[in-house]
Image (cartoon, rainbow, N blue to C red):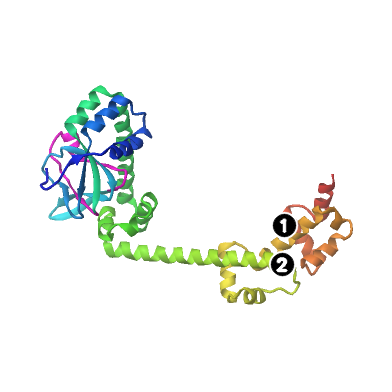
């Protein structure tokens, strides 16, 4: 194994933490717990420190408590990142799993990393006597192979943008945490290409956030001031009320609410009328046309058309249905 790795006996809290993770897959019995308390080790490696090298036997299987590791191989003197693992991931040699042969990859710390470890001799012995542990590691391996298959597929057939989206979805937060060149190597794209894609998506995220903020501000203003009831309301006047340019308000309406200005205003007018119709004191003292003018409609036909478009029936039909 790589030199200068300091293994110490794991503390009880380390054992408990690992058992909690394993118990989510299958119950861990008392005897297996005793075995982990006896044989589980802990070590810490610094950023850029090698955990194990190519062409050596990996004697342990590791569990990442905190930090990040990457698996690498070399081809034509070029380093290729084959996987990146972070907290709550298990790591060992893929080609020499359970110490069965020499490793074709090496693993190095991307960050200062805290690990738990158990020797493969002990693990193989436990597999013999504890069905639960076999079940747990079968589930872990199934997840690993599914993730590896999905990653291999997207790298083969996906373009750079699709690979970026795949990594961002399956590894939330890692794009800001991990060195860009490592992620680029994993996804088999140029670092400059990945950076360009990342910046474009950050721009989209900022724009979506801005649209949401202005959309919420518009909603608060409409509810508070009932601007929709003003017959002479226009896009320009509403934009001025909330401190936006007409162009930006139009973008908010079209992109955030997926509505034209008039449909957005009529939505509020129709809802106000529906609430009024439900109130017996109001509907007994006002005609539907009077409510429509009070809501901001300037004509009977505009009111009936907007109401039927929103509700699927005429105002009179809606009123009669409520009274049945």
Residue 159 visible in image: no
- Horizontally, residue 178 falls left or right of residue 313, namely left
Which sits in the foreground, 104 or 206?
Answer: 206
- Name the residue furthest right: 285
Classify 183 as above or below 221: above
Which sits in the foreground, 315 or 245?
Answer: 245
- Horizontally, residue 35 falls left or right of residue 160, namely left
Report crowding for label 1: few under 14, some 14 to 19, many 20 or more residues within 10 A (C-alpha). Answer: some
Q: Which residue is mark 2?
A: 226
Magenta stretch contains residue 27:
no
Residue 102 position, x and y percent, is 12, 39
Displayed quadrant of residue 188: bottom left
Sequence order check: which comes first, mark 1 or mark 2? 2
Residue 152 visible in image: yes
Residue at x 80% of width, y 51% of height? 318
- Horizontally, residue 248 falls left or right of residue 161, namely right
- Horizontally, residue 231 falls left or right of residue 57, namely right
Closest to the camera, between mark 1 and mark 2, is 2
Displayed quadrant of residue 32: top left
Residue 72 position, x and y percent, is 19, 50
Q: Quadrant of the N terminus?
A: top left
- Extent of the magenta region: 85-111
Which of the numbered marks, if any, corresponds to residue 309? 1
């Amino acid at each position: 194994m790589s030199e200068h790795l300091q293994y110490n006996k794991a503390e009880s809290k380390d054992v408990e933490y690992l058992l909690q993770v394993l118990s989510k897959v299958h119950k861990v019995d008392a005897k297996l717990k005793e075995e982990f308390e006896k044989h589980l080790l802990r070590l810490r490696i610094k950023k850029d420190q090698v955990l194990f090298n190519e062409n050596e036997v990996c004697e342990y299987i590791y569990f990442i408590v905190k930090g990040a590791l990457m698996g690498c191989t070399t081809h034509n003197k070029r380093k290729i990142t084959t996987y990146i693992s972070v907290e709550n991931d298990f790591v060992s040699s893929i080609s020499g799993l359970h110490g069965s042969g020499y490793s074709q990859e090496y693993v190095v710390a991307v960050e200062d990393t805290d690990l738990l470890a158990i020797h493969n001799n002990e693990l193989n012995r436990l597999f013999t006597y504890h069905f639960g542990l076999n079940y747990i590691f079968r589930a872990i391996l199934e997840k690993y192979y599914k993730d590896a298959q999905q990653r291999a597929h997207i790298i083969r057939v996906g373009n750079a943008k699709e690979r970026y989206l795949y990594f961002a979805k399956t590894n939330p937060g890692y794009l800001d945490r991990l060195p860009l060149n490592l992620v680029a190597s994993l996804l088999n794209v140029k670092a400059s290409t990945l950076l360009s894609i990342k910046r474009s998506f950050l721009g989209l995220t900022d724009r979506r956030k801005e649209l949401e903020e202005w959309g919420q501000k518009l909603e608060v203003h409409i509810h508070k001031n009932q601007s929709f009831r003003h017959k002479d309301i226009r896009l320009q006047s509403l934009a001025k009320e909330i401190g936006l340019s007409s162009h930006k308000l139009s973008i908010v309406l079209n992109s955030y609410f997926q509505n034209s200005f008039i449909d957005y205003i009529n939505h509020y007018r129709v809802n106000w009328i529906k609430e009024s119709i439900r109130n017996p004191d109001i509907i007994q003292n006002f005609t539907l046309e009077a409510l429509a003018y009070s809501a901001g409609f300037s004509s009977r036909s505009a009111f009936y058309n907007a109401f039927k478009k929103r509700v699927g029936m005429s105002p009179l039909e809606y009123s009669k249905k409520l009274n049945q």
